[in-house]
Image (cartoon, rainbow, N blue to C red):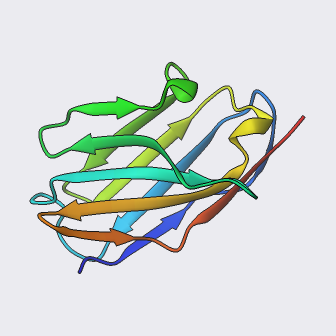
Amino acid sequence: QVQLVESGGDLVQAGGSLRLSCAASETIFSINTMGWYRQAPGKQRELVAIVTSGNNRNYTDSVKGRFTISRDNAKNTVYLQMNSLKPEDTAVYYCYAKRGNFASWGQGTQVTVSS
């Protein structure tokens, strides 16, 4: 299974921006779907954004227009650019990769947005 390592989480004020990175241990060229999930305290893990090998992207409604997911196959990295951050975006953000029937998760990176 591919190993995933997230980085870029931080404490930021509302309205600010962050860019999360997810570095994979192997080529992501053949990975069908990569994405980001998040989990806030006391809540279930939810999908934030996904990008397919064909570069199709989908976002949860609450982040549309603010977040952008991208993948750089040459660097084996997936990014999540987060703009206009809100306190409700506070969560641990997890990178996700799915190849065939196998899914991999990173350890998570904390994003905290202060009001």
Position of residue 115 in the picture relative to residue 95 (left or right)? right
- Position in image of residue 12 (x %, y %): 79, 44
- Rendered-image quadrant of the N terminus: bottom left
- Position in image of residue 22 (x %, y %): 42, 61
Position of residue 31 in the picture relative to residue 7 (left or right)? left
Q: Quadrant of residue 76?
A: bottom left
Extreme-right residue of the structure: 115
Q: Is residue 8 visible?
A: no
Image point 47% across, 31% down: which residue? 60
Judge by depth and name the residue closer to the eye, 65 or 46. Answer: 46
- Position in image of residue 92 (x %, y %): 64, 59
Image point 90% across, 34% down: which residue? 115
Image point 39% across, 38% down: which residue? 69
Judge by depth and name the residue closer to the eye, 97 or 13. Answer: 97
Vertical placement of residue 65 versus 110, above or below: above
Image point 46% across, 56% down: which residue? 21
Vertical placement of residue 51 versus 39, above or below: above
Q: Is residue 31 visible?
A: yes
- Position in image of residue 77 (x %, y %): 33, 58
Q: How many marks?
A: 0
Extreme-top residue of the structure: 65
Q: Quadrant of residue 100?
A: bottom left
Judge by depth and name the residue closer to the eye, 26 or 45. Answer: 45
